[in-house]
Amino acid sequence: MVKPTENLVRHRERTERALIEVARSLVATRPYSAIRVREVADLAGCNHGLITHYFGGKLGLFTAVLHSLAGEVTAALSEHGTAGVALEHEATATFWRLLAALLNDGLDPQRALVEGQPALGVIEQRASEISGQSLPELRPLASLVLLLVGGYHVFGDVFSSTLRPTKDDRDAVALFQRLMMLILAGLNAEQ
């Protein structure tokens, strides 16, 4: 027999999951600033007050979405490696756009990135394989890669003519990969 408190916990978990999924789908197609809490709640089939109750408000809900996206990015990188996924994966682009919007809305960067560092471990491991260096030495490099990828998604449109020699996104990916190989080669040369 299921206890009443277990039903409440399951209901809360389902509602939280639905709110995160709806918010995730909206932020993939629209700017964060254009999304209203009532719209998210309506689409999730619940009262908009639950967003405040469960997440503390819009910022808290979308921080949960940010952490969910970070998990997707990490999974994609683990499955496919760093080649191409970092710049082409839809969750990656959404993650960086949302991160920039949330930071602009007042999110503490530590809160955003404690759980939301997409693929730092995956990047460290891949960089270790390429360079032959130990993981602790590569944490700054992995952080730099995240900063570069994040900057690309946040500011890429502004610098598109520099970052994309042609209209083909694969050229941007190839340029990014060449730059990272040069950085890794430089690290090996210093030893």
Image (cartoon, helix red, strand yellow):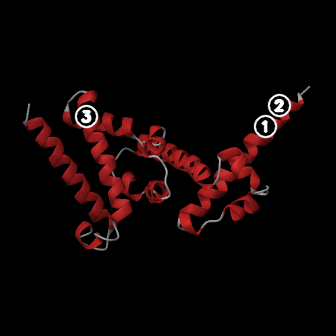
Residue 104 x %, y % = 45, 59
Q: Amino acid at mark 2?
A: Glu
Judge by depth and name the residue closer to the eye, 155 or 102.
102
Q: Quadrant of the N terminus?
A: top right
- x, y percent for residue 127: 26, 38
Residue 94 - label: none
User: In this orientation, which residue lies closer to the viewer: 119 or 9?
Assistant: 9
Local packing at callout 3 (Cα closer than 10 Å; few below 14, some 14-19, many 20+) is: many
Q: Which residue is mark 3?
A: 138
Expressed as whole percent of the image width and height from the top left, the position of residue 63 reads: 55, 49
Q: Pointer 2: residues within 10 angstroms few (<14), some, or many (20+)?
A: few
Q: Amino acid at mark 1?
A: Arg
Mark 1, secondary structure of its residue: helix
Q: How far apart, in angstroms, are the residues tagged by discs 2 and 1?
A: 6 Å
Mark 3: which secondary structure?
helix
Badge 3 vs badge 2, beta-carbon distance below 8 Å = no
In terms of secondary structure, where does tag 2 sit?
Answer: helix
Q: Is residue 95 above or below residue 155?
A: above
Label 3 vs label 2: CA separation?
45 Å
- In the picture, the disc for residue 6 is 2
Is residue 78 depicted above or below 161 in this figure?
above
In this figure, which residue is indicated by the disc labeled 1? 10
Residue at image position (33%, 40%) is: 123
Check whether the beta carbons of the residues at disc 2 and disc 1 lie within 8 A of each other. yes
